[in-house]
Image: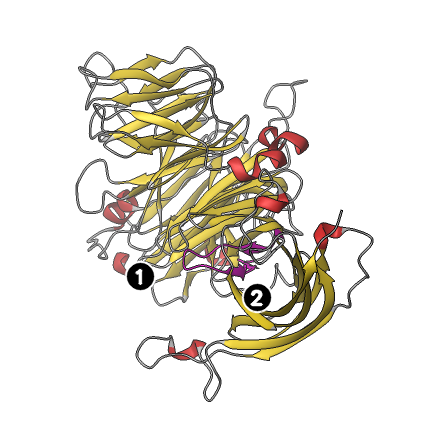
Amino acid sequence: MSRSAYTPLTGGINLVTPPTQLDPGACLYAVNYECPVTGGYRRIEGYAAEGPEVPGEGPILGVASLSDRILAIREQAPRASAEEGGDPQRWAALFQLDDSAWRFLAEAHPGRHEWAEGNVTGTEGGRTLFGVGQGKPFGVQLPADEAGDYVSVVELSGALVGELPDGATYAASGDTITVTDTGSRDITGVTVIGRDGTTLLTVADVLGDGSTNTTLDIDLTGIAPNDVAYITLTIGSGNYPRRLSVPDLELNYTVLADAPSGACFIALFKNHLFLGFEPGSLQHSGIGDPENWDAATGGAGEIGVGQTLTGLLLGPGGVLHVVCRDSIQTLYGTNAEDWQLKTTVPNSGGRPYSAQSLMQPYFIAERGIASLEATNAYGDFRPMQPGHPVEPLFLQNQLFTRVVASAISKQRAQYRVWFDNGTGIYMSPAGITTVRFPHQVAVAYSGELDDGNEMLLFGSNAGMIYRLDNGATTFGGTDIEAFLTLAYNNLRSPSMRKRFRRVFWDVRSGSDANISILPDFDYGRTETGIPRREFIQFLLGGGLWDVATWNNLSWSVPSLGQEPMNVAGTGTAINFAIYSKSSSSPHEILGYDIHFDHRRPRRG
């Protein structure tokens, strides 16, 4: 008698449950698939390059976004030492992506950078992106909302924003802005650009016969101060052109000069800016004033954590989790007068650059993905192990020692972490899968555009910046190769041999795709004949009126495909290995309906 059974797919990878006891909707392995919270398995979206290669050398040291502006940090060629016989000086540069090109914004310390965004002052225009990379912390603010009204060149000069090299200054007198370099470097390449994009003064206008000087006068006689947008100039050889801009057209970069140097981690908590130092020091600014680090008068302070510090993470209930190498500690309170640091997890900590918060804190511990769940006991937390199903991956491959970056996707409810071997793990409430990129992730950032859309970025070892998801159908131009091996399904009769005949796959996709599917029987036993690989092709993408996105649906096609596939084989259980390689939009495999006959009980 012919029978049929439907199996919904969900659950993600499970490497700890015996194959005979595994839920048939789970999978044995998945590469470049994800687990949507709605169920099924979805091939991931890819990523696309944001601009050309960032100038410099080595991996990207930091990437971030502020509103719709993308920032990147990369190390530069060493400079000759200012002292005779001294070692070359390492340095890095902060760039802004401007019209598909990277434009120098400021110098930076050549260390790995971490970020925190917020408004500690509570004032209009106080939104700031703070960064630190083992040097002095700094802040980047959006341009002013309105253009200024400058009645003189002196007033214009006082309003300009931008960073000149150390030892270079500028000042205005009358209609002239004078730039001076105390390091005896030549000042060249001066131009003045107007608000309408025209060049108000060229290099020839300023330099005349082309001679260079360590002091240069920029004469703006006859030019209305309100017509000036910015001034560009180059000081010394080997330096990027610098820009002095009116504040409504340029990001405002400010070094927190009074803050301590050397921090690796940064967070905004209770209107304080916190800096985490790897040896075990946690220092904070005055309340509402990230530039005030005077403990005697400004409310700044320092807290010792007693262990190697590996991250700072905001937690639910208004707490700051201090992630250490061998413990998790939690800071309670509102200011320096009532801080309380308690040990939440005493004997297990988190790896650097793995801590993220998505409803609750997640991080990588010795046995894989761990989290802290808030309890009702006086606001405390208890450790959890949501990564238990993939624990063998971390133990066998020592992945817990190889974390390079992490991020969250709020839209997909995912915690994402990447390793130094080109692989990564995506975890959602529906399950865990793995990813494999052709470009090595060096740093990552989770941001948000002003319209609410997500901005997930990563910087590569080769100096490129990529935006994840956002409709990308390739890995930076490379086809996406995806594997999915489903769990074995005994159809609730583990001792009964069955004759499998046909499978109907529930597939949802936004474009054409070509998927190969290989069945297997009896948990891979060699006594069973080798089955034939089958291919299914489909064009889907229908949607519901007033529900689907207009540009993401196709007319006169179904929203769900039920694709048939022949399976000729006998066994007590069956599973499927699924493979695709394409530059098409992602497909979702939601479940399958299998047709079979019962044969006989298996014999010993």
Does residue 587 appear in the picture of this structure? no
Q: What is the three-letter code of the residue carrying label 2?
A: Thr
Along the line of sight, the residue nearer the viewer: 522 or 412: 522
Along the line of sight, the residue nearer the viewer: 459 or 245: 459
Q: What is the three-letter code of the residue carrying label 1?
A: Asp
Task: Point out the tag, 1 or 2, that comes first from the N-terminus.
Answer: 1
Along the line of sight, the residue nearer the viewer: 54 or 333: 333
| Cα–Cα span, label 1 and label 2 | 23 Å
Q: Position of residue 253 (x, y in %)?
A: 36, 41
Q: Position of residue 300 (x, y in %)?
A: 25, 18
Q: Residue at x 55, y 67 (%)?
A: 592
Does residue 19 appear in the picture of this structure? yes
- Residue 423's place in the image compared with 569, above or below, is above
Q: Which residue carries the number 1 mark?
A: 451
- Residue 261's place in the image compared with 232, above or below, is above
* Label 1: how many Cα within 10 Å (few below 14, some 14–19, many 20+): few
Q: Which residues are magenta?
A: 30-51
Q: Judging from the image, what secondary structure is the residue with disc 2 in?
A: loop
Q: Is residue 394 magenta?
A: no
Q: Is residue 571 left or right of residue 154?
A: right
* Quadrant in which residue 424 is drawn: top right
- Residue 537's place in the image compared with 185, above or below, is below
Q: Position of residue 449 (x, y in %)?
A: 35, 56
Q: Residue at x 54, y 66 (%)?
A: 5
Q: Which mark is residue 427?
A: none
Q: Which residue carries the number 2 mark?
A: 473
Along the line of sight, the residue nearer the viewer: 213 or 502: 502
* Quadrant in which residue 384 is drawn: top left
